[in-house]
Amino acid sequence: MLLGEVIGTIWATRKYEAVKGYKLQLLQPMNSNREKLGEPIIAVDTIGAGPHEIVFFITSSEAVIPMEVNMAPVDAAIVGIVDSINLEIKPEK
Amino acid sequence: MLLGEVIGTIWATRKYEAVKGYKLQLLQPMNSNREKLGEPIIAVDTIGAGPHEIVFFITSSEAVIPMEVNMAPVDAAIVGIVDSINLEIKPEK
Amino acid sequence: MLLGEVIGTIWATRKYEAVKGYKLQLLQPMNSNREKLGEPIIAVDTIGAGPHEIVFFITSSEAVIPMEVNMAPVDAAIVGIVDSINLEIKPEK
Amino acid sequence: MLLGEVIGTIWATRKYEAVKGYKLQLLQPMNSNREKLGEPIIAVDTIGAGPHEIVFFITSSEAVIPMEVNMAPVDAAIVGIVDSINLEIKPEK
Amino acid sequence: MLLGEVIGTIWATRKYEAVKGYKLQLLQPMNSNREKLGEPIIAVDTIGAGPHEIVFFITSSEAVIPMEVNMAPVDAAIVGIVDSINLEIKPEK
Protein backbone atom coordinates (compact mmCIF):
# COMPACT_ATOMS: atom_id res chain seq x y z
CA MET A 1 0.00 0.00 0.00
CA LEU A 2 1.09 3.56 -0.60
CA LEU A 3 0.51 6.84 1.20
CA GLY A 4 -1.46 9.64 -0.45
CA GLU A 5 -3.24 12.92 0.20
CA VAL A 6 -6.82 13.58 -0.90
CA ILE A 7 -6.50 16.56 -3.29
CA GLY A 8 -9.78 16.53 -5.22
CA THR A 9 -12.81 14.71 -6.57
CA ILE A 10 -13.81 13.41 -10.01
CA TRP A 11 -17.33 13.96 -11.36
CA ALA A 12 -18.60 11.64 -14.07
CA THR A 13 -22.25 11.05 -14.99
CA ARG A 14 -21.62 8.60 -17.85
CA LYS A 15 -19.82 5.68 -16.19
CA TYR A 16 -19.90 1.93 -15.74
CA GLU A 17 -22.91 0.87 -13.61
CA ALA A 18 -21.04 -0.82 -10.75
CA VAL A 19 -19.04 2.27 -9.84
CA LYS A 20 -22.12 4.51 -9.55
CA GLY A 21 -22.73 5.70 -5.99
CA TYR A 22 -19.07 5.55 -5.03
CA LYS A 23 -17.00 8.64 -4.41
CA LEU A 24 -13.99 8.95 -6.70
CA GLN A 25 -11.19 10.81 -4.95
CA LEU A 26 -8.13 12.30 -6.59
CA LEU A 27 -5.07 11.24 -4.55
CA GLN A 28 -1.53 12.63 -4.66
CA PRO A 29 0.80 9.71 -3.79
CA MET A 30 3.53 10.64 -1.28
CA ASN A 31 6.43 9.12 0.62
CA SER A 32 6.76 8.76 4.39
CA ASN A 33 8.14 12.33 4.60
CA ARG A 34 4.95 13.59 2.91
CA GLU A 35 6.83 14.51 -0.27
CA LYS A 36 4.94 14.09 -3.58
CA LEU A 37 5.59 10.90 -5.58
CA GLY A 38 4.59 11.03 -9.24
CA GLU A 39 1.18 12.04 -10.53
CA PRO A 40 -2.26 11.95 -8.83
CA ILE A 41 -4.42 8.84 -9.34
CA ILE A 42 -8.17 8.23 -8.97
CA ALA A 43 -9.31 5.91 -6.14
CA VAL A 44 -12.67 4.70 -4.84
CA ASP A 45 -13.31 5.89 -1.27
CA THR A 46 -15.49 3.78 1.01
CA ILE A 47 -13.87 5.03 4.25
CA GLY A 48 -14.95 8.65 3.97
CA ALA A 49 -11.68 10.55 3.81
CA GLY A 50 -11.87 14.33 3.78
CA PRO A 51 -9.90 16.82 1.71
CA HIS A 52 -6.16 16.86 2.55
CA GLU A 53 -6.35 13.84 4.86
CA ILE A 54 -3.43 11.40 4.55
CA VAL A 55 -4.62 7.92 3.57
CA PHE A 56 -3.11 4.61 2.50
CA PHE A 57 -4.46 3.05 -0.63
CA ILE A 58 -4.20 -0.17 -2.62
CA THR A 59 -3.55 -0.37 -6.37
CA SER A 60 -4.44 -3.81 -7.72
CA SER A 61 -7.43 -5.89 -8.67
CA GLU A 62 -8.15 -6.42 -4.94
CA ALA A 63 -9.29 -2.79 -4.82
CA VAL A 64 -12.84 -3.93 -5.51
CA ILE A 65 -13.11 -5.65 -2.11
CA PRO A 66 -14.19 -2.60 -0.07
CA MET A 67 -17.18 -2.08 -2.40
CA GLU A 68 -20.61 -3.62 -1.82
CA VAL A 69 -20.71 -5.21 -5.28
CA ASN A 70 -18.91 -8.42 -6.21
CA MET A 71 -17.49 -7.18 -9.46
CA ALA A 72 -16.41 -3.68 -10.38
CA PRO A 73 -13.79 -2.32 -12.75
CA VAL A 74 -11.72 -0.65 -10.05
CA ASP A 75 -7.94 -0.72 -9.55
CA ALA A 76 -7.38 1.70 -6.66
CA ALA A 77 -9.17 2.13 -3.34
CA ILE A 78 -8.58 3.97 -0.07
CA VAL A 79 -8.07 1.37 2.69
CA GLY A 80 -7.47 3.56 5.75
CA ILE A 81 -6.81 7.06 7.07
CA VAL A 82 -3.39 7.53 8.66
CA ASP A 83 -3.19 8.74 12.27
CA SER A 84 0.59 8.68 12.51
CA ILE A 85 3.73 7.23 10.94
CA ASN A 86 6.28 5.85 13.40
CA LEU A 87 9.78 5.82 11.90
CA GLU A 88 12.28 3.54 13.67
CA ILE A 89 15.62 5.19 14.42
CA LYS A 90 18.44 2.89 13.36
CA PRO A 91 20.60 2.07 16.41
CA GLU A 92 24.32 2.76 16.26
CA LYS A 93 26.35 -0.44 16.43
CA MET B 1 -7.76 4.66 -12.19
CA LEU B 2 -6.03 7.14 -14.44
CA LEU B 3 -7.21 9.99 -16.66
CA GLY B 4 -6.78 9.80 -20.43
CA GLU B 5 -7.89 11.38 -23.70
CA VAL B 6 -9.28 9.34 -26.60
CA ILE B 7 -6.82 10.01 -29.45
CA GLY B 8 -7.49 7.20 -31.92
CA THR B 9 -8.76 3.73 -32.71
CA ILE B 10 -7.05 0.40 -33.42
CA TRP B 11 -8.24 -1.82 -36.30
CA ALA B 12 -7.43 -5.52 -36.16
CA THR B 13 -9.21 -8.27 -38.08
CA ARG B 14 -7.08 -11.16 -36.81
CA LYS B 15 -7.61 -11.14 -33.05
CA TYR B 16 -8.62 -13.31 -30.12
CA GLU B 17 -12.32 -14.29 -30.34
CA ALA B 18 -13.51 -12.76 -27.05
CA VAL B 19 -12.40 -9.23 -27.95
CA LYS B 20 -14.24 -9.20 -31.28
CA GLY B 21 -17.09 -6.70 -31.36
CA TYR B 22 -15.46 -4.37 -28.84
CA LYS B 23 -14.07 -0.99 -29.80
CA LEU B 24 -10.36 -0.60 -29.09
CA GLN B 25 -9.55 3.02 -28.33
CA LEU B 26 -6.10 4.55 -28.24
CA LEU B 27 -5.81 6.62 -25.03
CA GLN B 28 -3.22 9.23 -24.11
CA PRO B 29 -2.83 9.05 -20.30
CA MET B 30 -2.77 12.49 -18.64
CA ASN B 31 -2.56 14.11 -15.23
CA SER B 32 -5.21 16.24 -13.50
CA ASN B 33 -3.89 19.32 -15.34
CA ARG B 34 -4.49 17.54 -18.68
CA GLU B 35 -0.76 17.24 -19.34
CA LYS B 36 0.40 14.08 -21.18
CA LEU B 37 1.78 11.21 -19.06
CA GLY B 38 3.90 8.66 -20.93
CA GLU B 39 2.81 6.83 -24.06
CA PRO B 40 -0.69 6.00 -25.38
CA ILE B 41 -2.22 2.65 -24.45
CA ILE B 42 -5.02 0.56 -25.99
CA ALA B 43 -8.24 0.16 -23.95
CA VAL B 44 -11.58 -1.55 -24.51
CA ASP B 45 -14.45 0.95 -24.60
CA THR B 46 -17.93 -0.17 -23.49
CA ILE B 47 -19.09 3.32 -22.44
CA GLY B 48 -18.98 4.90 -25.91
CA ALA B 49 -16.45 7.70 -25.52
CA GLY B 50 -15.92 9.99 -28.51
CA PRO B 51 -12.70 11.38 -29.94
CA HIS B 52 -10.87 13.76 -27.55
CA GLU B 53 -13.22 13.09 -24.62
CA ILE B 54 -11.50 12.84 -21.23
CA VAL B 55 -12.12 9.45 -19.60
CA PHE B 56 -10.89 7.49 -16.59
CA PHE B 57 -9.68 3.99 -17.22
CA ILE B 58 -8.58 0.93 -15.29
CA THR B 59 -5.39 -1.05 -16.00
CA SER B 60 -5.51 -4.48 -14.37
CA SER B 61 -7.08 -7.88 -14.82
CA GLU B 62 -10.40 -6.41 -13.59
CA ALA B 63 -10.63 -4.61 -16.93
CA VAL B 64 -12.61 -7.55 -18.32
CA ILE B 65 -15.59 -6.77 -16.06
CA PRO B 66 -17.33 -4.21 -18.31
CA MET B 67 -17.42 -6.75 -21.15
CA GLU B 68 -20.33 -9.13 -21.75
CA VAL B 69 -18.09 -12.20 -21.75
CA ASN B 70 -16.75 -13.89 -18.62
CA MET B 71 -13.19 -14.24 -19.81
CA ALA B 72 -11.25 -12.01 -22.13
CA PRO B 73 -7.58 -11.19 -22.46
CA VAL B 74 -7.96 -7.50 -21.66
CA ASP B 75 -5.90 -5.35 -19.28
CA ALA B 76 -7.29 -1.84 -19.85
CA ALA B 77 -10.86 -0.55 -20.11
CA ILE B 78 -12.60 2.82 -20.07
CA VAL B 79 -14.78 3.04 -16.92
CA GLY B 80 -16.30 6.52 -17.23
CA ILE B 81 -16.27 9.84 -19.03
CA VAL B 82 -15.17 12.79 -16.91
CA ASP B 83 -17.53 15.76 -16.52
CA SER B 84 -15.26 17.77 -14.22
CA ILE B 85 -12.31 17.54 -11.88
CA ASN B 86 -12.70 19.36 -8.58
CA LEU B 87 -9.33 20.25 -7.03
CA GLU B 88 -9.37 21.10 -3.33
CA ILE B 89 -7.50 24.27 -2.41
CA LYS B 90 -5.24 23.59 0.56
CA PRO B 91 -6.24 25.90 3.41
CA GLU B 92 -3.61 28.15 4.97
CA LYS B 93 -2.94 27.20 8.61
CA MET C 1 -2.94 -3.36 -24.13
CA LEU C 2 0.26 -2.22 -25.75
CA LEU C 3 1.62 -2.30 -29.29
CA GLY C 4 4.67 -4.39 -30.16
CA GLU C 5 6.63 -5.86 -33.05
CA VAL C 6 7.55 -9.56 -33.27
CA ILE C 7 11.37 -9.54 -33.33
CA GLY C 8 12.31 -13.12 -32.43
CA THR C 9 11.50 -16.43 -30.80
CA ILE C 10 12.60 -18.11 -27.55
CA TRP C 11 13.59 -21.79 -27.52
CA ALA C 12 13.43 -23.68 -24.22
CA THR C 13 13.22 -27.44 -23.78
CA ARG C 14 13.20 -27.47 -19.98
CA LYS C 15 10.08 -25.53 -19.04
CA TYR C 16 6.90 -25.71 -17.00
CA GLU C 17 4.49 -28.32 -18.45
CA ALA C 18 1.53 -26.02 -19.18
CA VAL C 19 3.51 -23.73 -21.51
CA LYS C 20 4.77 -26.60 -23.68
CA GLY C 21 3.38 -26.48 -27.22
CA TYR C 22 2.97 -22.71 -27.19
CA LYS C 23 5.12 -20.42 -29.28
CA LEU C 24 7.08 -17.88 -27.23
CA GLN C 25 7.61 -14.72 -29.23
CA LEU C 26 10.06 -11.96 -28.41
CA LEU C 27 8.19 -8.62 -28.73
CA GLN C 28 9.61 -5.11 -28.93
CA PRO C 29 7.01 -2.80 -27.31
CA MET C 30 6.38 0.39 -29.32
CA ASN C 31 4.24 3.52 -29.29
CA SER C 32 1.58 4.54 -31.84
CA ASN C 33 4.32 6.10 -34.02
CA ARG C 34 6.12 2.71 -34.12
CA GLU C 35 8.98 4.01 -31.97
CA LYS C 36 10.58 1.52 -29.54
CA LEU C 37 9.44 1.62 -25.90
CA GLY C 38 11.79 -0.03 -23.41
CA GLU C 39 13.12 -3.58 -23.70
CA PRO C 40 11.68 -6.63 -25.49
CA ILE C 41 9.46 -9.00 -23.52
CA ILE C 42 8.43 -12.64 -24.04
CA ALA C 43 4.76 -13.33 -24.89
CA VAL C 44 2.71 -16.45 -25.68
CA ASP C 45 1.32 -16.35 -29.23
CA THR C 46 -1.94 -18.17 -30.00
CA ILE C 47 -2.89 -15.91 -32.93
CA GLY C 48 -0.01 -16.86 -35.21
CA ALA C 49 1.83 -13.58 -35.75
CA GLY C 50 4.75 -13.61 -38.15
CA PRO C 51 8.14 -11.92 -37.85
CA HIS C 52 7.93 -8.09 -37.84
CA GLU C 53 4.14 -8.01 -37.68
CA ILE C 54 2.68 -5.31 -35.39
CA VAL C 55 0.53 -6.83 -32.64
CA PHE C 56 -1.24 -5.70 -29.48
CA PHE C 57 -0.56 -7.68 -26.36
CA ILE C 58 -1.76 -7.97 -22.78
CA THR C 59 0.51 -8.03 -19.72
CA SER C 60 -1.31 -9.34 -16.66
CA SER C 61 -2.53 -12.56 -15.15
CA GLU C 62 -5.40 -12.58 -17.70
CA ALA C 63 -2.77 -13.49 -20.32
CA VAL C 64 -3.50 -17.17 -19.69
CA ILE C 65 -7.00 -16.86 -21.21
CA PRO C 66 -6.04 -17.41 -24.87
CA MET C 67 -4.41 -20.74 -23.95
CA GLU C 68 -6.25 -24.08 -24.00
CA VAL C 69 -5.28 -24.88 -20.39
CA ASN C 70 -7.02 -23.46 -17.35
CA MET C 71 -3.87 -22.61 -15.48
CA ALA C 72 -0.52 -21.55 -16.83
CA PRO C 73 2.25 -19.36 -15.48
CA VAL C 74 2.01 -16.75 -18.20
CA ASP C 75 1.93 -12.95 -17.87
CA ALA C 76 2.01 -11.73 -21.48
CA ALA C 77 0.08 -12.87 -24.56
CA ILE C 78 -0.52 -11.58 -28.08
CA VAL C 79 -4.24 -10.70 -28.43
CA GLY C 80 -4.45 -9.44 -32.03
CA ILE C 81 -2.53 -8.37 -35.12
CA VAL C 82 -2.90 -4.69 -36.01
CA ASP C 83 -4.24 -3.77 -39.45
CA SER C 84 -4.15 -0.02 -38.94
CA ILE C 85 -4.01 2.70 -36.31
CA ASN C 86 -6.43 5.59 -36.83
CA LEU C 87 -5.23 8.75 -35.05
CA GLU C 88 -7.88 11.44 -34.51
CA ILE C 89 -6.82 14.94 -35.52
CA LYS C 90 -7.67 17.39 -32.75
CA PRO C 91 -10.05 20.02 -34.12
CA GLU C 92 -9.08 23.67 -33.83
CA LYS C 93 -11.45 25.58 -31.56
CA MET D 1 9.60 -10.92 -4.40
CA LEU D 2 11.75 -8.02 -3.33
CA LEU D 3 14.05 -7.38 -0.39
CA GLY D 4 13.26 -4.65 2.13
CA GLU D 5 14.13 -3.33 5.58
CA VAL D 6 11.51 -2.66 8.25
CA ILE D 7 11.87 1.08 8.94
CA GLY D 8 8.64 2.00 10.71
CA THR D 9 4.98 1.35 11.46
CA ILE D 10 1.72 2.95 10.29
CA TRP D 11 -1.06 3.75 12.79
CA ALA D 12 -4.60 4.09 11.50
CA THR D 13 -7.79 3.79 13.53
CA ARG D 14 -10.22 4.50 10.69
CA LYS D 15 -9.59 1.69 8.22
CA TYR D 16 -11.29 -1.05 6.24
CA GLU D 17 -12.58 -3.81 8.57
CA ALA D 18 -10.58 -6.75 7.14
CA VAL D 19 -7.21 -5.13 7.76
CA LYS D 20 -7.92 -4.41 11.45
CA GLY D 21 -5.70 -6.44 13.79
CA TYR D 22 -2.85 -6.65 11.28
CA LYS D 23 0.40 -4.81 11.76
CA LEU D 24 1.21 -2.39 8.94
CA GLN D 25 4.96 -2.09 8.52
CA LEU D 26 6.78 0.60 6.58
CA LEU D 27 9.39 -1.13 4.36
CA GLN D 28 12.34 0.39 2.51
CA PRO D 29 12.87 -1.73 -0.62
CA MET D 30 16.53 -2.59 -1.27
CA ASN D 31 18.74 -4.53 -3.67
CA SER D 32 20.91 -7.56 -2.85
CA ASN D 33 23.72 -5.21 -1.73
CA ARG D 34 21.34 -3.63 0.81
CA GLU D 35 21.21 -0.35 -1.12
CA LYS D 36 17.90 1.56 -1.09
CA LEU D 37 15.57 1.13 -4.09
CA GLY D 38 12.91 3.81 -4.49
CA GLU D 39 10.47 4.89 -1.81
CA PRO D 40 9.14 3.00 1.26
CA ILE D 41 5.89 1.06 0.89
CA ILE D 42 3.35 -0.21 3.44
CA ALA D 43 3.04 -4.01 3.89
CA VAL D 44 0.98 -6.31 6.10
CA ASP D 45 3.19 -8.32 8.47
CA THR D 46 1.99 -11.76 9.61
CA ILE D 47 5.51 -13.14 10.23
CA GLY D 48 6.48 -10.78 13.05
CA ALA D 49 9.48 -8.93 11.69
CA GLY D 50 11.26 -6.53 14.01
CA PRO D 51 12.63 -3.06 13.30
CA HIS D 52 15.55 -3.08 10.81
CA GLU D 53 15.21 -6.77 9.97
CA ILE D 54 15.70 -7.62 6.27
CA VAL D 55 12.61 -9.29 4.83
CA PHE D 56 11.32 -10.37 1.42
CA PHE D 57 7.87 -9.21 0.48
CA ILE D 58 5.29 -9.71 -2.26
CA THR D 59 3.49 -6.93 -4.10
CA SER D 60 0.39 -8.22 -5.88
CA SER D 61 -3.15 -9.30 -5.21
CA GLU D 62 -1.79 -12.57 -3.75
CA ALA D 63 -0.61 -10.54 -0.75
CA VAL D 64 -3.89 -11.32 1.00
CA ILE D 65 -2.99 -15.03 1.32
CA PRO D 66 -1.00 -14.79 4.58
CA MET D 67 -3.99 -13.20 6.33
CA GLU D 68 -6.68 -15.17 8.18
CA VAL D 69 -9.50 -13.59 6.17
CA ASN D 70 -10.48 -14.63 2.65
CA MET D 71 -10.78 -11.16 1.25
CA ALA D 72 -8.83 -8.08 2.17
CA PRO D 73 -7.79 -5.01 0.23
CA VAL D 74 -4.05 -5.63 0.56
CA ASP D 75 -1.36 -5.45 -2.13
CA ALA D 76 1.88 -5.99 -0.17
CA ALA D 77 2.81 -8.52 2.53
CA ILE D 78 5.97 -9.72 4.26
CA VAL D 79 6.55 -13.38 3.30
CA GLY D 80 9.79 -14.19 5.15
CA ILE D 81 12.74 -12.85 7.12
CA VAL D 82 16.11 -13.20 5.38
CA ASP D 83 18.89 -15.10 7.14
CA SER D 84 21.45 -14.72 4.39
CA ILE D 85 21.88 -13.97 0.68
CA ASN D 86 24.23 -16.31 -1.19
CA LEU D 87 25.63 -14.65 -4.32
CA GLU D 88 27.13 -17.04 -6.90
CA ILE D 89 30.54 -16.01 -8.19
CA LYS D 90 30.60 -16.21 -11.99
CA PRO D 91 33.29 -18.71 -13.05
CA GLU D 92 36.00 -17.57 -15.47
CA LYS D 93 35.78 -19.37 -18.78
CA MET E 1 7.77 -13.02 -19.33
CA LEU E 2 11.26 -11.61 -18.88
CA LEU E 3 14.75 -13.05 -19.23
CA GLY E 4 17.04 -13.36 -16.22
CA GLU E 5 20.23 -14.99 -14.96
CA VAL E 6 20.37 -16.99 -11.73
CA ILE E 7 22.90 -15.08 -9.59
CA GLY E 8 22.26 -16.36 -6.07
CA THR E 9 19.99 -17.91 -3.48
CA ILE E 10 18.02 -16.51 -0.52
CA TRP E 11 18.04 -18.33 2.83
CA ALA E 12 15.16 -17.70 5.24
CA THR E 13 14.11 -19.94 8.11
CA ARG E 14 11.26 -17.75 9.37
CA LYS E 15 8.85 -17.56 6.46
CA TYR E 16 5.25 -18.10 5.47
CA GLU E 17 4.33 -21.82 5.60
CA ALA E 18 3.33 -22.29 1.93
CA VAL E 19 6.70 -21.18 0.57
CA LYS E 20 8.68 -23.64 2.75
CA GLY E 21 10.41 -26.33 0.70
CA TYR E 22 10.74 -24.13 -2.38
CA LYS E 23 14.06 -22.78 -3.56
CA LEU E 24 14.22 -19.00 -3.70
CA GLN E 25 16.57 -17.88 -6.45
CA LEU E 26 18.01 -14.40 -6.88
CA LEU E 27 17.58 -13.42 -10.56
CA GLN E 28 19.22 -10.59 -12.48
CA PRO E 29 16.71 -9.49 -15.14
CA MET E 30 18.30 -8.95 -18.58
CA ASN E 31 17.40 -8.02 -22.15
CA SER E 32 17.72 -10.20 -25.26
CA ASN E 33 21.38 -9.10 -25.60
CA ARG E 34 22.08 -10.42 -22.06
CA GLU E 35 22.56 -6.89 -20.71
CA LYS E 36 21.39 -6.24 -17.12
CA LEU E 37 17.96 -4.62 -16.64
CA GLY E 38 17.37 -3.05 -13.25
CA GLU E 39 17.86 -4.79 -9.91
CA PRO E 40 17.76 -8.50 -9.01
CA ILE E 41 14.45 -9.98 -7.84
CA ILE E 42 13.60 -13.13 -5.84
CA ALA E 43 11.73 -15.91 -7.68
CA VAL E 44 10.47 -19.39 -6.75
CA ASP E 45 12.23 -22.10 -8.78
CA THR E 46 10.36 -25.35 -9.51
CA ILE E 47 12.29 -26.11 -12.73
CA GLY E 48 15.70 -26.60 -11.13
CA ALA E 49 17.83 -23.90 -12.74
CA GLY E 50 21.51 -23.84 -11.88
CA PRO E 51 23.77 -20.88 -11.13
CA HIS E 52 24.23 -18.55 -14.13
CA GLU E 53 21.67 -20.31 -16.29
CA ILE E 54 19.46 -17.98 -18.38
CA VAL E 55 15.79 -18.45 -17.55
CA PHE E 56 12.48 -16.78 -18.35
CA PHE E 57 10.27 -15.87 -15.44
CA ILE E 58 6.80 -14.57 -14.71
CA THR E 59 6.00 -11.67 -12.38
CA SER E 60 2.33 -11.64 -11.42
CA SER E 61 -0.13 -13.42 -9.19
CA GLU E 62 -0.09 -16.38 -11.62
CA ALA E 63 3.41 -17.16 -10.31
CA VAL E 64 1.88 -19.49 -7.73
CA ILE E 65 0.76 -21.96 -10.45
CA PRO E 66 4.01 -23.95 -10.71
CA MET E 67 3.88 -24.71 -6.97
CA GLU E 68 2.18 -27.80 -5.51
CA VAL E 69 0.01 -25.73 -3.16
CA ASN E 70 -3.16 -23.91 -4.21
CA MET E 71 -2.37 -20.69 -2.44
CA ALA E 72 0.97 -19.11 -1.81
CA PRO E 73 2.11 -15.52 -1.45
CA VAL E 74 4.41 -15.56 -4.47
CA ASP E 75 4.73 -13.00 -7.27
CA ALA E 76 7.67 -14.31 -9.32
CA ALA E 77 8.52 -17.80 -10.58
CA ILE E 78 10.94 -19.36 -13.05
CA VAL E 79 8.92 -20.87 -15.94
CA GLY E 80 11.66 -22.26 -18.21
CA ILE E 81 15.37 -22.42 -18.96
CA VAL E 82 16.38 -20.78 -22.23
CA ASP E 83 18.22 -22.87 -24.84
CA SER E 84 18.51 -20.13 -27.44
CA ILE E 85 17.09 -16.78 -28.52
CA ASN E 86 16.37 -16.47 -32.24
CA LEU E 87 16.37 -12.82 -33.36
CA GLU E 88 14.67 -12.14 -36.71
CA ILE E 89 16.68 -9.94 -39.06
CA LYS E 90 14.47 -7.19 -40.48
CA PRO E 91 14.38 -7.53 -44.26
CA GLU E 92 15.38 -4.56 -46.39
CA LYS E 93 12.48 -3.22 -48.40
Image (cartoon, coloured by chain):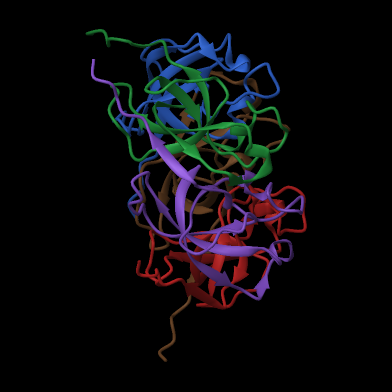
Chain colours: A brown, B blue, C green, D red, E purple
> In terms of image quadrants, where is residue D66?
bottom right
Depth check, front residue: A54 or D61: D61
Position in image of residue A64 (x %, y %)? 65, 38
Residue A83 vs C73, above or below: the answer is below
Depth check, front residue: C57 or D42: C57
Instruction: Name the image quarter holding the N terminus of chain D.
Output: bottom right
Could you tell me if residue A7 is visible in this image? no
Residue B4 vs B37, above or below: the answer is above
In the rendered structure, the answer to whether residue B90 lies left or right of residue C63 reads: left
Q: Residue at x 49, y 53 (%)?
A: A2
Depth check, front residue: D39 or B12: B12
Position in image of residue E15 (x %, y %)? 67, 70
Position in image of residue B56 (x %, y %)? 47, 26
Q: Residue at x 50, y 42 (%)?
A: E1
Position in image of residue A5 (x %, y %)? 44, 49
Q: Residue at x 57, y 34 (%)?
A: A23
Could you tell me if residue D24 is visible in this image? yes
> In terms of image quadrants, where is residue D33?
bottom left
Instruction: Name the image quarter holding the C terminus of chain D.
Output: bottom left
Residue D42 vs A78, above or below: the answer is below
In the rendered structure, the answer to whether residue A21 lies left or right of residue C34 reads: right
Farthest bottom residue in view: A93
Depth check, front residue: D63 or A76: D63
In the rendered structure, the answer to whether residue B38 lies left or right of residue E59 reads: left
**How many tags in the picture?**
0
